[in-house]
Image: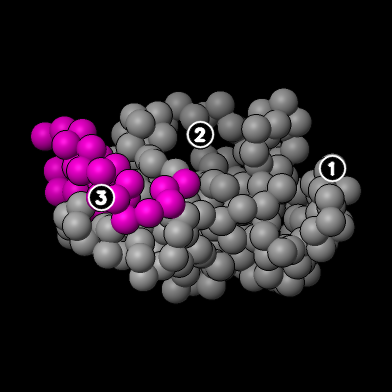
């Protein structure tokens, strides 16, 4: 499959597109085959604290809803919470921060995933090329490095392997700072899962950011799916 370079500026200038909540987005991509960190949903601060105890500390707590696409920018994420009391307090703050235009909201609780490397992956629909699967280097240096590659969907496992090989930062995919090399078979499965999602015309885009590499396994700790029409 040929290498492509979609119009990124055009992608960034999209008009408003409905999104799924993070919980709904996680379910959709996990069902397709993406390795996603474990999570639970809660309606109240007390339920969030109970869920955190079940999942194990430390955890992250986020305010979620179909109309909330940019949680971090709005301060709707609390990280590294180490006990039930801190989870309950953070969850109460997040619920209080909901705006009327957010519509129905709930809380998402997920164990903290740690690793020295981050990747990003996604599905975009380019006006010229159509559905494309994207893979790039994530984390704090993502914008400075600008190491991103695209392939037209659908992807075969071989196409996915070649997409991984297109990244310039190959040393980051090998053994790194005492951690094993990135499990390429898992990464191939994730990229092929994104390709499968491209078959659904109602899915406009998928953003897995970040994929944290932990013990060599790339794990999605956030997911955002844009859809052509709002779903109930």
Q: Are marks 1 and 3 in contact (CB under 8 Å)?
A: no
Q: Is residue 142 above or below residue 169?
A: above
Within 10 angstroms of label 2, few (less than 14), some, or many (20 or more) residues? few
Q: Is residue 110 magenta?
A: no
Instruction: List x then y, in percent, for residue 75.
Output: 35, 31
The residue nearer to you, when weighing 24 against 205, is: 24
Q: Which residues are magenta?
A: 80-108
User: Which residue was labeled with disc 3?
Assistant: 88
Q: Do callouts 2 and 3 mark residues in contact (Cβ within 8 Å)?
A: no
Residue 130 in percent (x, y) is at 55, 49
**Residue to which mark 2 is pinned:** 11
**Residue occupying the point 37% across, 54% down:** 83
Residue 172 position, x and y percent, is 82, 48
In this picture, residue 183 sits left or right of residue 94: right
Residue 211 seen in the current view: yes
Q: Secondary structure at mark 2?
A: helix
């Amino acid at each position: 499959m040929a290498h492509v370079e979609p119009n990124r500026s055009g992608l960034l200038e999209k008009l408003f597109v409905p999104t799924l909540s993070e919980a709904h987005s996680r379910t959709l991509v996990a069902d397709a085959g993406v390795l996603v960190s474990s999570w639970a949903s809660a309606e109240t601060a007390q339920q969030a604290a109970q869920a955190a105890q079940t999942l194990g500390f430390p955890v992250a707590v986020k305010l979620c809803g179909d109309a909330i696409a940019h949680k971090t920018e709005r301060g709707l994420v609390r990280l590294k919470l180490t006990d039930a009391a801190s989870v309950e307090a953070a969850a109460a703050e997040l619920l209080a921060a909901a705006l009327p235009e957010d519509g129905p909201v709930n809380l998402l609780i997920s164990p903290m995933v740690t690793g020295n490397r981050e990747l990003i992956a996604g599905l975009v629909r380019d006006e010229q090329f159509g559905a494309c699967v994207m893979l790039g280097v994530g984390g704090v240096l993502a914008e400075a490095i600008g190491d991103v590659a695209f392939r037209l969907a659908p992807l075969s496992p071989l196409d996915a392997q070649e997409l991984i090989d297109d990244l310039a930062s190959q040393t980051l995919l090998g053994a790194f700072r005492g951690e094993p090399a990135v499990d390429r078979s898992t990464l191939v499965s994730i990229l092929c899962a994104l390709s499968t999602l491209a078959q659904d015309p109602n899915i406009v885009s998928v953003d897995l950011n970040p994929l944290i590499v932990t013990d060599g396994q790339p794990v999605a700790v956030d997911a955002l799916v844009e859809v052509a029409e709002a779903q109930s």
